[in-house]
């Protein structure tokens, strides 16, 4: 019988730990502050950003918002990044992705002060992750990959020597998760599959762990899963429920595939809450580093 990697409960436990650490920081005169930059009115992105501010309030982190209209130009966005870089109340910030079409996302990410990069997506911080395979990385780690590893290990599942297949090569998950999984403290072996992979099923069938981050509902079907595999469902697609007619989240892993798993992350309630908790952890850790 497959067991659940409960992201909601794990994130709640992490938030309780972070609340205590924020109290200690405040007692030492440091108020951690998270900034967000949201461009446009996409309902999903707006929901995620609102959630980030609610999470901050829950654990005692201050928060700062920069909301720009969808018509914002590259210059407008770069100016907002500069304001957050300069704001002393903002100890770390994120640029909500994706940015509207026509905006040079990499250029925007490169302008974030690496010391304030709460998402760990600045090239300097990704570069540190590439270079430091055994030492502690003294900057933020990308939230979803960090959250996935935390979710698995907090449930007592050992990743050492495991064959992990990652599906999807996006900026926030696929490109960087291999860097974390192959660090010496985790020691997994990673295969990164993507839209150019010739035979996806041939890879997933041999995998001990599948991290599905393709954003394609149900791309992982039961025939692609080995008995006893660990299934991590990162994909978030919005579909209409044929019975209720309501919009709902559809993950990348077909529900029937879970029956073959030893552990699986539900979706919703798995990786998403962990992503949110890791952002808070990054803000707290960076404030603690600044004090040390
Ligand atoms: N700058 C960033 N942009 C984006 C990131 C990111 O880490 N940094 N990740 C995603 C969006 N995201 C956070 O920003 C995010 C996605 C999902 C969830 C979440 O809690 N999902 C719920 C279900 C939500 C629903 O019902 O729609 C769950 O899994 O239980 C939180 C944050 C892309 N952009």
Image (cartoon, grey):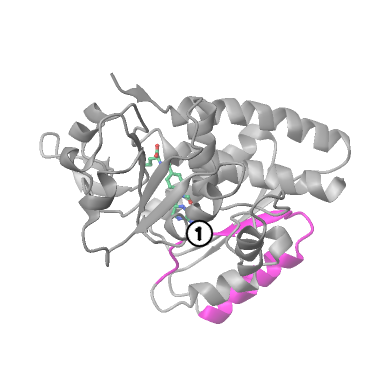
- Residue at left offset 57%, top offset 81%: 75
Whole-percent x, y for residue 270 in the image: 41, 34
- Residue at left offset 40%, top offset 45%: 164
Give SS at disc 1. Answer: loop
The answer to whether residue 91 is above or below residue 243 is: below
User: In front: 258, or 58?
Assistant: 258
- Residue at left offset 21%, top offset 39%: 254
Whole-percent x, y for residue 109 in the image: 58, 69
- Residue at left offset 50%, top offset 31%: 158
Report which quarter residue 162 is drawn in.
top left
**Residue at far left of view:** 243
The answer to whether residue 186 is above or below residue 34 is: above
Name the residue carrying label 1: 96
Q: Is residue 93 magenta?
A: yes
Dividing the image into 4 quarters, which one contains the C terminus? top right
Q: Is residue 68 magenta?
A: no
Left or right: 260 in relation to 170:
left
User: In front: 154, or 46?
Assistant: 154
In this figure, what is the number of numbered marks? 1
**Would you call the spot at circle 1 few (<14 residues within 10 Å), some (14-19), or many (20 or more)?**
some
Left or right: 7 in relation to 81:
left
**Residue at far top of view:** 1
Left or right: 80 in relation to 243:
right
Report which quarter residue 247 is drawn in.
top left
| Beta carbon of the mark 1 residue lies under 8 A of ligand 1 | yes
The answer to whether residue 106 is above or below residue 237 is: below
User: In front: 283, or 71?
Assistant: 283
Span colored in magenta: 74-100
């Amino acid at each position: 019988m497959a067991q659940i990697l409960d992201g909601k409960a794990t994130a709640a436990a992490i938030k309780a730990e972070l609340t205590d650490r924020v109290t200690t920081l405040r007692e030492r005169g440091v108020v951690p502050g998270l900034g967000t930059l949201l461009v446009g009115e996409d309902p999903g992105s707006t929901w995620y950003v609102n959630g980030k501010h609610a999470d901050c309030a829950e654990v005692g982190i201050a928060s700062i918002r920069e909301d720009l209209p969808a018509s914002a130009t590259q210059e407008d966005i770069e100016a907002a990044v500069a304001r957050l870089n300069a704001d002393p109340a903002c100890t770390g910030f994120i640029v909500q992705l994706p940015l509207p079409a026509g905006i040079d996302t990499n250029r925007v990410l490169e302008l974030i002060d690496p010391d304030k990069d709460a998402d760990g997506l600045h090239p300097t911080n990704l570069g540190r992750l590439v270079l430091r395979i055994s030492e502690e990385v003294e900057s933020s780690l990308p939230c979803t990959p960090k959250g996935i590893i935390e979710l698995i290990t907090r449930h007592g599942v050992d990743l050492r020597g495991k064959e992990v297949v990652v599906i999807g090569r996006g900026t926030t998950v696929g490109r960087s998760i291999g860097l974390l999984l192959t660090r010496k403290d985790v020691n997994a072996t990673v295969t990164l599959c993507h839209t150019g992979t010739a035979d996806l099923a041939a890879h997933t069938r041999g995998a001990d762990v599948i991290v599905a981050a393709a954003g394609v509902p149900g791309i992982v079907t039961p025939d692609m899963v080995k008995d006893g595999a660990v299934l991590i469902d990162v994909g978030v697609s919005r579909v209409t429920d044929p019975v209720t007619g309501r919009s709902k989240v559809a993950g990348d892993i077909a529900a029937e595939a879970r029956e073959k798993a030893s552990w699986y992350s539900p979706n919703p309630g798995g990786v998403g809450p962990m992503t949110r908790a890791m952002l808070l952890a990054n803000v707290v850790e960076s404030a603690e580093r600044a004090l040390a």
